[in-house]
Amino acid sequence: MKSSKPLLLFLVFFALTGLRAQEVYKNYYKSPVRPGGRNYLSGNFAELRPNHFHAGLDFKFGGQEGEPIYAAADGWVHRIKVSSFGYGNVIYLKHPNGQITLYGHLRNFNDPLSEYMRKKMYEAKANSLEVYPEPGELTVKQGELIANGGNTGSSGGPHLHFEIRDSLDRAMDPLLFGFPEIVDKTAPTPQALALVPLDINSRVNGRFARLEITPTPTGTEYRLPSTIQTTGKVGLEVKSYDMLDGASNKNGYPVFKLYQEDSLILDLTVDKIDFNLTRQFLLHTHQNRFTKLYSQKALRYDYIRPKSEEAGHIFLDAGEKKNYKLELKDALGNTRTVRFTLEGRDTETQVNSNFTSSRAKLSFHQNVMEISAPVSVQGGLAKFYVGENTFEMLPAYQDSKSRTYLWDMNFGIPDQVDICSEVVQTGVLARIPQGEERLFANSFAQVIFRENSLLEDLFLRIQTTGSVSSPKLEINSPSEYLYNPIEISWKVSPGALERSKTHVYSQSSNGRKSFVGGNWEEGAIRFSTRNFGTFVLAEDKEKPSISPVRVNSSELRFIIRDNLSGINNFEASVNGEWVLMRYEHKQAVIWSEKLSKQPFKGDVLLKVTDEAGNVAVWKGTI
């Protein structure tokens, strides 16, 4: 790889980097938690979370709820929400500089905001509600108590989730704005580097296979223990973490810089998080663990410089050896270096594949289909059957015990492959291009792909398994991802199950079922999903359970649970008047909040409905 072109692009890039800094207002905000005291974080900006970047800072409370939460700057309430999911009870403040601060997982709002939301919720007769007050309607001053910290929503423990967003609602790293209460002098730690082939002709140590290596510490730096041999274009990925002083939990960091012989060839900086692109994270990482340090055609993130389709694509001629340096840098500038060496080599056909199975194994890597199999006395010339055409192919490489075939499915989709010792059914039914609306249909299913359904081109595999009484629909693998939902019409009979109570559930490898839904049509059930995997039918005829905890003139409190489909909604009334019920799904608790101080008196009615439409009713009298 020549360095002159990337260097030219980087000169342009560095001339523009000042644009990023203009939106960072140093010392404009004060800490929302214990301002002026020491604070510790359980999460930070750009940390890798399941299916998304963490978009802010998580302030620790020492395991207790009730921590005072203060406005980080003057402003007004831009948005406020009461919910049992996501950010839970959350406040968004807008500030004169055009930016927004977010305060999530709150136990409660301050008295004026609590009263404001109660009135709005009673007006709407809604147990969860999001409101956008008019600018200036609810003003706050910097340092004003706005709430108390809690554990509401999708929180795993008491903490404050705090964000700073720009005027376009994109999250930025709060640590860049200056919060001296948080101390970090610790550099990131690399756990593993991975070299991956980027096309069908690429190899890492002779194989078309991902190679993960643990770096070894050498003083203040890290180094890979041996030279890695590459053929064709390969990409680098890194698994790593950062830690802040005084805390044992692992966090993320935003900056990755890759150098070839001291020339910067790639800068990946996560400076803003656009919530419209959240699931692009699934392309940006490998299994939510490794950050990919190379451009991808379908990736819409704007983090990589230079802006090039081949940024980070490493290519070395045979016999060419290069030294590389990877810098990992956190928001406060603490930097760790990893050094390694790559050497180019020609494609080889005799390679140890480490394959030990007695039967052929079929796997998919984007557009490349790989078949690994034991050596056969019947020969090694495989026949790929593509429509009416037959293509013969020798193994891409082999050793004394095994052989590996590689096929580019953009060239054509084989129905089956005869590898002499057995015939392999590929199961690939169609290529669905990313960015196009497509309809696929066969004898047992119809799938509608919208223009924005896919993250990248998809090679569709769909089959029915199970039995007549317990059918299953399998679509690709749970490790493959969708960007937005697809719509499926599954031609299946509910059999002895009651149609109105029978829905589609996704089933994990351990058998756990999660409600998906669906509506029955003539001979089929239609449903939408944003995840691949195994889908089954299940009948839920059991009503939710309602267990009273406290029912008196001061409060209504119940435990509500559902054994399969899950809680959909609940409604309570006293003497015919609607009553606001708050919900904490992690404890399965609902409790009342009064609009006035008048005691409850009269008939109490609570209705709880699950996702399958079963309704449980509890009646009592105060």
Image: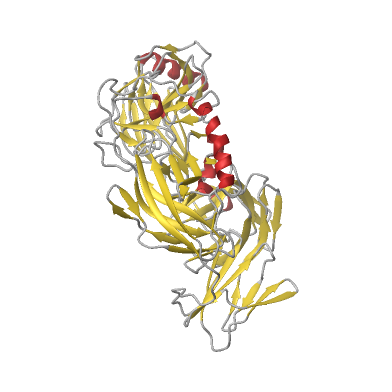
Q: Position of residue 290 (x, y in %)?
A: 44, 51
Q: Evaluate whether residue 554 shows in this view.
A: yes
Q: Residue furthest bottom?
A: 377
Q: Residue furthest right?
A: 388
Q: Quadrant of the N terminus?
A: bottom right
Q: Position of residue 280 (x, y in %)?
A: 54, 44
Asked whether 616 or 287 is in front, the reply is 287
Q: Is residue 564 left or right of residue 591?
A: right
Determine whether 318 is above or below 548 in the image. Answer: below
Determine whether 114 is above or below 374 in the image. Answer: above
Location of residue 8 (image quadrant): top right
Asked whether 272 or 553 is in front, the reply is 272
* Residue positioned 34% across, 33% down in the render: 151
Asked whether 29 or 520 is in front, the reply is 29
Determine whether 245 is above or below 308 in the image. Answer: above
Q: Is residue 83 left or right of residue 473?
A: left
Q: Position of residue 313 (x, y in %)?
A: 55, 53
Q: How many marks?
A: 0
Q: Evaluate whether residue 535 shows in this view.
A: no
Q: Quadrant of the C terminus?
A: top left
Colour logic: secondary structure
Q: Position of residue 221 (x, y in %)?
A: 32, 49
